[in-house]
Image (cartoon, grey):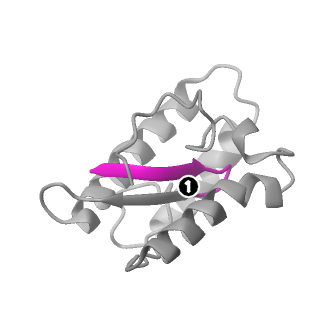
Amino acid sequence: MRVYSYCLMPSHLHLIADAERGLLSAIIRDFKSYTGKKMIAVIQEHPQESRKEWLLYLFSYFGKRNQQNAQHQFWQQNSHPIDLQSQHWITQKVSYIHENPVKAGLVNEAHHWVFSSANPQSGLLLSPL
């Protein structure tokens, strides 16, 4: 997967990406499966997580409501892909993604959000647009 722009919010992830090989939908499915299992394990094993029981209950509750889950559901089952067919759309969506934490009131400027490609210190190697 090549990632061009991203913003990880407290409750969701925005991403502009494509697949170098294979189907992007399959890569995202595998990403969600892997990261969801890892996050559940981190929550279960963290001795100071004060919301552990509540979080695990919610993930289990939603997991049982969905036949595609073995036990827990961390991510929503669906994604909302948009085919970016022009440079104008790409520019518009990158701006939307980067401004998400500002609009949510989490930071005053997009580049202050640590979990975003707007932050020059984010550490994730991006593919050029």
Helix, strand or loop under label 1: helix
Q: Which residue is at the far top?
A: 47
Q: Which of 88 and 46 is in front in this view?
A: 88
The one of 53 and 86 positioned closer to us in this rendering = 86
Q: Name the residue under label 1.
A: 59
Does residue 65 show up? no
**Looking at this view, is 25 or 125 the one in front?**
125
Q: Is residue 36 above or below residue 103?
A: above
Task: Point out residue 81 in the picture as x, y percentages from the top left corner.
Answer: 42, 75
Kindly identify the residue that appears in the image at 60 percent across and 23 percent down. 46
Q: How many marks?
A: 1
Which quadrant is the C terminus positioned in? Answer: bottom left
The residue located at (50%, 54%) in the rendering is 74
Q: Where is residue 24 in the image (x, y as percent from the top left)?
A: 26, 64
Quick check: 102 left or right of 32? right
**Which residue does the image show at 82% across and 47% down from the upper left?**
106
Residue 40: x and y in percent read 49, 40
- Report the magenta residues as a range: 1-12
Q: Which residue lies furthest to the left in this view?
A: 21
Crowding at dot 1, Cα within 10 Å, few <14 / some 14-19 / many 20+, comes out as: some
Q: What residue type is labelled 1?
A: Phe
**Above or below for 91 versus 43:** below
Question: Residue at point 27% right, 67% down?
Answer: 25
Q: Where is residue 86 in the image (x, y as percent from the top left)?
A: 41, 78
In this picture, residue 42 sits left or right of residue 107:
left
- Can residue 116 be seen in the rendering of this structure? yes
Q: Is 8 contained in the magenta span? A: yes
Towards the viewer: 29 or 106:
106
User: Is-magenta flag for residue 97?
Assistant: no
